[in-house]
Amino acid sequence: MTAPKILWIDGVGSFALCDSPEVSIGQAYPGNSVDLAIRGDISRNAAVIQRVGEDHVLQPTQTVEFAGTPTDRPVLLADGMRFNLGRIELQYSRPSKLSATARLELLGNNRWQPLLTSAILLGESCILGAGSGCHIRCPDWSEQVTLFRNGEQWFCRIPATANVKLNGQIVRAPVPLQVGQRIRGDEISMILE
């Protein structure tokens, strides 16, 4: 299992990119080894979200509530579904029906550790842009950027009209997405850590 990497997008936020088939969720405290840590009233290891084909299944390790109904059994997550792990409320969404990628957001006053805008549960692709079907909403962008997986490597496809530079050179073809690499253009500026 690989720890999520953080995608920082200037003017938009920070996003945990979770590309493992299992993503663990639990309390943020020193030494806890969960993939997604939350500062709040939640157990150390509250749940695991498993990618099963095109779907995500929530496997609670503590009682989880869906619309006030508690369960300790696995639940197939659907777009727009809200659930509570203890007093922590989360929302699962699948903005694009053409992609198995989903977004997991904290609701209320609790925060991710490190501070994140949301967690992205990656399928084979992830769309960044202004449209409602984008996994990561970038309201000021006029172009869409697509992250896609080829084997174990992630790539970034940027439209030629976006005038994006990587290491000072204009990008015309998909480029491997690498830690520490800044991708910058007229509207686009992001780095993977």
Image: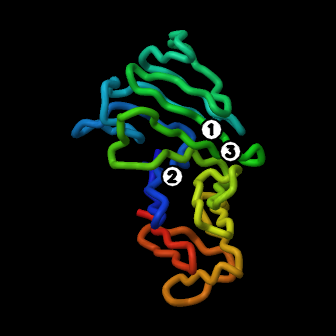
- Picture mark count: 3
Q: Which residue is mark 1?
A: 93
Tell me the CA gap for discs 3 and 1: 6 Å
Judged from the image, the secondary structure of the residue bearing numbered disc 2 is strand
Considering the image in quadrants, where does the C terminus appear?
bottom left
Query: In the image, is 45 to the left or to the right of 53?
Result: left
Q: Nearer the viewer, mark 1 or mark 2?
A: 1
Report the residue that reaches farthest toward the bottom: 169
Judged from the image, the secondary structure of the residue bearing numbered disc 1 is strand
Q: Position of residue 178 (x, y in %)?
A: 49, 69
Q: Are marks 3 and 1 in contact (CB under 8 Å)?
A: yes
Report the residue that reaches farthest toward the left: 30
Report the residue that reaches farthest toward the front: 140
- Relative to 154, residue 164 above or below: below
- Relative to 79, residue 153 above or below: below
**Sequence order check: which comes first, mark 3 or mark 2?**
2
Judged from the image, the secondary structure of the residue bearing numbered disc 3 is loop
Amino acid type shown at disc 1: Ser
Amino acid type shown at disc 2: Leu
Amino acid type shown at disc 3: Pro
Residue beneath the point at 35% across and 35% down: 110
**Sequence order check: which comes first, mark 1 or mark 2?**
2
Tell me the CA gap for discs 1 and 2: 15 Å
Residue beneath the point at 32% across and 32% down: 27
Nearer-the-camera pick, 189 or 124: 189
Query: In the image, is 18 to the left or to the right of 86?
Result: right
Q: Nearer the viewer, mark 3 or mark 2?
A: 3
Q: Are marks 3 and 2 in contact (CB under 8 Å)?
A: no
Q: Which residue is mark 3?
A: 95
Specify few, some or many for label 3: CA neighbours under 10 Å numbering under 14, 14-19, or 20 or more.
many
Nearer-the-camera pick, 84 or 5: 84
Q: Which mark is residue 17?
A: 2
